[in-house]
Amino acid sequence: MLDLIDFLCKGGVDAICLLGSTGEFLNVPFADRIRLVHLGVKRSRVPILAGVSHSTLDGAVELASEAVGSGAAGLLLMPPYFFQYGQDDVLEFYFRFREQVPKRIPVFLYNIPQFTNPIAIKSATALLATGQFAGIKDSSGDQPYFEQLLAFKKEAEFTLLCGNDRLARWARASGAEGVVSGCACAVPELLAALDRAPSDALESQLMEFIERIDQFPTPVGVKVAAGLRKLKTGPLAVPLDREKCIILEEFKTWFAAWSKTLPPAGPEKRKS
């Protein structure tokens, strides 16, 4: 993980989201999640947004307490995963969590309905309207949903982060404060360049990468690409079938050539 943090900082990112979905947090033992946030905060030259998502409220609160103690700049929390809950339950979960973590630490909602219970737009706006939550990372890829969040920014003050790389350029141009990118784990310089100086060419390059990695389950493509950039990524959590293994070998060959066309890394950010 430490080499990944160094790699991302050199790639010109402004902050790092640690132990999100692309980071396969649910496959990381509880004690290791605590340790990785502690080490990550010490190592990073940019602020760390710590993912503290858990299937239980108590688990999320404990992870949050440890992350705050380690110096994380903020917390990222999805609704509880695996079991299905209604929107009233989701609201209660977030309010109970906010009551049990220090008020000084920013808490970001994390909407990613592909993997867990959704945060319906009415729930998101109800939570954000209280002023108790710093913002939301929307990874749904649902543009109308995101547009409703953008419209709500006229009524409430919060930070809106795009968590879907396909919408990254549009979201930033439309008023989102930032992008939390899974692709940036493998190609941070491309996302940093697209954010600094948006262009059709850079967006096309990103879309080409997305089309390639979308051939595989999340986050296989990003993980393999990061490994090809000499980062320690470990084995795949679940083996691929024979046909996908053949496609994966083709992807590796393609990425080795394609990655040579990436823009140069931007200046490394420093902690303020």
Image (cartoon, rainbow, N blue to C red):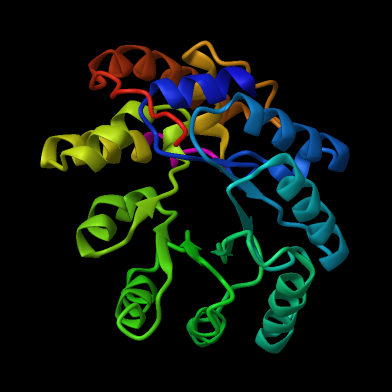
Q: Quadrant of residue 158?
A: bottom left
Question: The C terminus appears in which quarter of the rendering?
Answer: top left
Question: What residue do we see at 28% from left, 59% from top?
Answer: 171
Question: What residue do we see at 74% from left, 66% from top?
Answer: 80
Residue 226 against residue 27 in the figure, above or below: above
Residue 70 against residue 266 in the figure, above or below: below
Residue nearer the viewer, 182 or 93: 93
In the shown orientation, is residue 79 left or right of residue 123?
Answer: right
In the shown orientation, is residue 105 left or right of residue 52?
Answer: left
Residue nearer the viewer, 36 or 71: 71
Q: Is residue 259 magenta?
A: no
Question: What residue do we see at 49% from left, 14% from top?
Answer: 228
Q: Measured from the top left, where is residue 267 in percent x and y?
A: 30, 23
In the shown orientation, is residue 19 left or right of residue 158?
Answer: right
Evaluate whether residue 240 shows in this view.
no
Residue 16 against residue 96 in the figure, above or below: above
Query: What range of the chain is rendered magenta?
Result: 212-217
Q: Measured from the top left, where is residue 244 in percent x and y?
A: 55, 30
Question: What residue do we see at 41% from left, 53% from top?
Answer: 164
Residue 102 against residue 148 in the figure, above or below: above
Question: The N terminus appears in which quarter of the rendering?
Answer: top right
Q: Is residue 216 magenta?
A: yes
Q: Measured from the top left, where is residue 122 in percent x and y?
A: 51, 87
Residue nearer the viewer, 7 or 241: 7
Evaluate whether residue 251 shows in this view.
yes
Name the residue at the left extreme: 200
Majority secondary structure in the magenta region: loop
Count of labels in the image = 0
Q: Measured from the top left, where is residue 55 in percent x and y?
A: 80, 61
Residue nearer the viewer, 216 or 133: 133
